Image (spheres, rainbow, N blue to C red):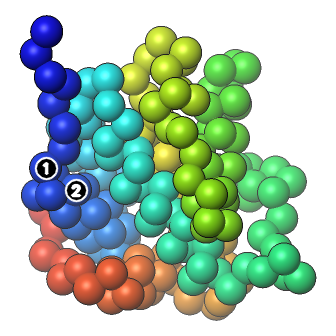
Amino acid sequence: MAPKKQPTPEDRSDAIQIVLAGLASGQDFNPVLEKLGALHIRNNTFPADELLELASDAIDESGATTADPIDFEKIRERFLPEHRFSGKNQHYKSKYAISAAAMIHGGVYPDLLDDAAWWQTDDLWIYSFFALLIFIRAAAERTGRSVEEVALSIADRRLVRLAPTKG
């Protein structure tokens, strides 16, 4: 049996570059999803792991603490109103990704591969992108900055130089 393909450091860098440049440019999220989809490795959590770590950074950017948390109630409806999650599976997967980002921010790294293995679809990365978008929007609202400014701040903290994006 051939070993499963693993993401390279360049793949990881590309995923971070694509998502932060896309969000910093203010472009619609569908082209960003398409570009991330081209990087996704079948039967691997990549790029979900990178996206959830960026979502953790966004939680940090928001200034959320145990004394002043981000309210989880209706978080998807408040910060991603243009995307409707339908059916039990989509609701579960999106809540899992949101919770996984919060776990990472709290210092507990979830077992992404094992947790998502039963899903029978290879889409954790999509729900992880939505979690990132939710937490970046939450950070923007809580800090009075734009989504673009929050994305640029995350890029700065990670020392990522953003290249201009092409639609």
Residue shown at 13% from the left, 9% from the top = 1
Say which quadrant the C terminus sits in: bottom left
Q: Residues within 10 Å of mark 2 (few under 14, many from 20)?
A: some
Measured in 3D between alpha carbons, the distance from the residue under mark 1 to the one under mark 2, in whole angstroms, is: 6 Å
In the drawing, what numbered circle is on residue 12? 2
Q: In the rendered structure, which amino acid carries the disc numbered 2?
A: Arg
Residue shown at 41% from the left, 55% from the top = 51
Residue shown at 62% from the left, 65% from the top = 107
Q: Is residue 137 visible?
A: no
Q: In the rendered structure, which amino acid carries the disc numbered 1?
A: Thr
User: Circle 1 sits on which residue?
Assistant: 8
> In the rendered image of this protein, does residue 78 appear above or below residue 161?
above
In the drawing, what numbered circle is on residue 63? none
- The picture quadrant where one finds residue 93 is top right
Q: Position of residue 22 (x, y in %)?
A: 29, 65
Q: Residues within 10 Å of mark 1 (few under 14, many from 20)?
A: few
Q: Position of residue 102 (x, y in %)?
A: 66, 60
> In the rendered image of this protein, does residue 111 appear above or below residue 144?
above
